[in-house]
Amino acid sequence: MSYLDFTQEELIYQYSPREAVPEHPVWKAHWSLFSEYARSKYDNISRVSYGSSKGQTLDIFPAKNKNSPINIFVHGGFWRFLDSFDHSLVAPAVVDAGGASVLVNYDLCPTVSLHKVIEQVRLALKWVYENAEKVNGDKNKIYISGHSAGGHLASMLCISEPLLSLGLPKNVIKGATIVSAMLDLEPIFLVPGSEELMIEQNECKELSPVYNPPDPSIELVIAVGGLETTEWIRQTEDMLHVLKDQGSNYTFFKPEYDQHYSILFSLGNPCTPLCKAMLDQMNLSL
């Protein structure tokens, strides 16, 4: 099997960050350490339920003041792995700048299908909108961010029609920061583990942000690491063409020395242009 002249073996490398970044266990260990530190030093409420299943929980880092902007972060892990606790490191920059940070958990595939995962993160957004005061936030100042598969899910949150069916306003999301995201699912079907997403290949387009981009009214920050694989970078570049054609307002970053794991620290570090852009989008600054 091949895709864009890649053999299956080459595609496994292109779409498997653990293959492309052999030292990934070290980076993930640092994620955990910095995340544990964040939870120990900042006020937070963990595992707040937003649905009926075990995986539907939120980790809330309230804003210091009422009616503050809210950032909802969606974690990655190929929709099959990881947890919000692995990603608490993104919260301090938002809280220090004056915002609230809410990290979303969801049931992992194959416990549920990818369709269900997308439904769950939409329900998480609904919970935040309806309970904004519980995080010292303003429901009219909600922003989304996500990394890797979480970038895919964050992008899917930026389509207004499904949100309207949940009783949410069309402009509920004011901005989004999409980092090293999976934006076209078609090649995923040639990578081991894709069967656990429990979707059919003919459903790829309806679940791919490159074919269902964020509403043009949503301000975007798009980023991909300069050391990502060529396919990961291509997917982001394809998305940029779509956004440009539809007239979206976006800012693009390609940190030269970031790979798939290190870029999460860039998102959480207020000294980086990427993090600054996310905070600027929320009208926050340190």
Image (tube, rainbow, N blue to C red):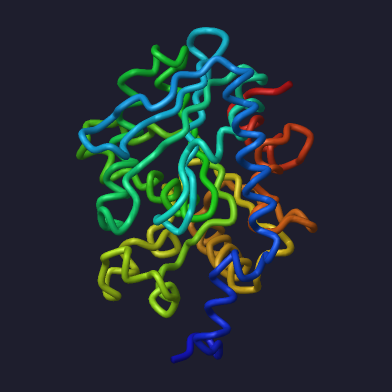
Q: Position of residue 170 (x, y in %)?
A: 33, 36
> Which quarter of the figure has residue 160?
top left
Q: Position of residue 128 (x, y in %)?
A: 36, 25
Residue at (67, 65) in percent of width and height: 21
Image height check: is 116 above or below 126? Answer: below
Q: Position of residue 153 (x, y in %)?
A: 41, 50
Residue at (51, 30) in percent of width and height: 71
* Residue furthest top in the image: 65
Image height check: is 271 above or below 187? Answer: above
- In the foreground, 167 or 203: 203
- In the foreground, 104 or 81: 81
Residue at (65, 53) in percent of width and height: 261
Q: Position of residue 98 (x, y in %)?
A: 62, 17
Q: Is residue 152 left or right of residue 234?
A: left
Image height check: is 285 above or below 268? Answer: above
Q: How many marks?
A: 0
Q: Dividing the image into 4 quarters, which one contains the C terminus?
A: top right
Q: Dividing the image into 4 quarters, which one contains the N terminus?
A: bottom left
Q: Is residue 244 left or right of residue 25?
A: left
> Which quarter of the figure has residue 130?
top left
Q: Is residue 142 left or right of residue 57?
A: right
